[in-house]
Amino acid sequence: VQLQASGGGLVNSGGSLRLSCAASGFSLYYYVIGWFRQAPGKEREGVSCISNSDDSTYYLDSVKGRFTISRDNAKNTVYLQIDDLKPEDTAVYYCAAVEDAQIYISRYGLSPIAYKYWGQGTQVTVSS
């Protein structure tokens, strides 16, 4: 079971990025996928997650309207579109997965401890 996050980079404030989380060794179809970020000196926080049953999505309040999570089961990939980037979005972004039966998504979908499998991070840096 492997997750590979990619798509990070250095962008100007107001710019956009699309992060990808590609799975190998298992099908994302059966998993809830979350995106998390960790800035230097701060705790890891959940920014978004998506269910596998009905594609319900959840967002951290501070990113609503700017972040969009989506999944493409045929490509075994989950995306995080980030628009109107702000300097405070600077962080390492991680994707994570957990079997859908093992998480109460509406309550714990943005909690890092609820997730079982983690990919390596991708750095997002936003200059002001």
Image (cartoon, helix red, strand yellow):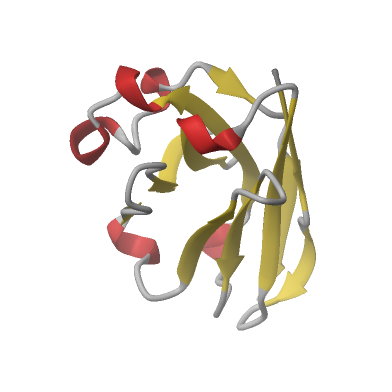
> Could you tell me residue 70's position as x and y percent?
52, 59
Residue that protrudes farthest toward the front in the picture: 74
> Could you tell me residue 84's position as x and y percent?
55, 80
- 77 displayed left or right of 34: right
Q: In which quadrant of the rendered view does residue 9 lie?
A: bottom right
Quadrant assignment for the N terminus:
top right
Give the residue at x 34% y 43%. Answer: 53
Q: Nearer the viewer, residue 74 or 124?
A: 74
- 89 displayed left or right of 65: right
Residue 99 drawn above or below residue 47? above
Residue that protrudes farthest toward the left in the picture: 107
- 64 displayed left or right of 85: left
Give the residue at x 72% y 59%. Answer: 125
> Could you tell me residue 3's position as x and y percent?
71, 30
Q: Is residue 44 visible?
A: no
In the rendered picture of this protein, how many numbered marks are placed on residues?
A: 0
Q: Is residue 118 visible?
A: yes
> Could you tell me residue 106's position as x and y percent?
21, 40
- 116 displayed left or right of 79: left
Give the residue at x 34% y 30%. Answer: 111
Q: Nearer the viewer, residue 41 or 13?
A: 13
Residue 116 drawn above or below residue 88? above
Quadrant assignment for the C terminus:
bottom right
Give the residue at x 51% y 40%. Answer: 36
Residue 100 drawn above or below residue 106? above
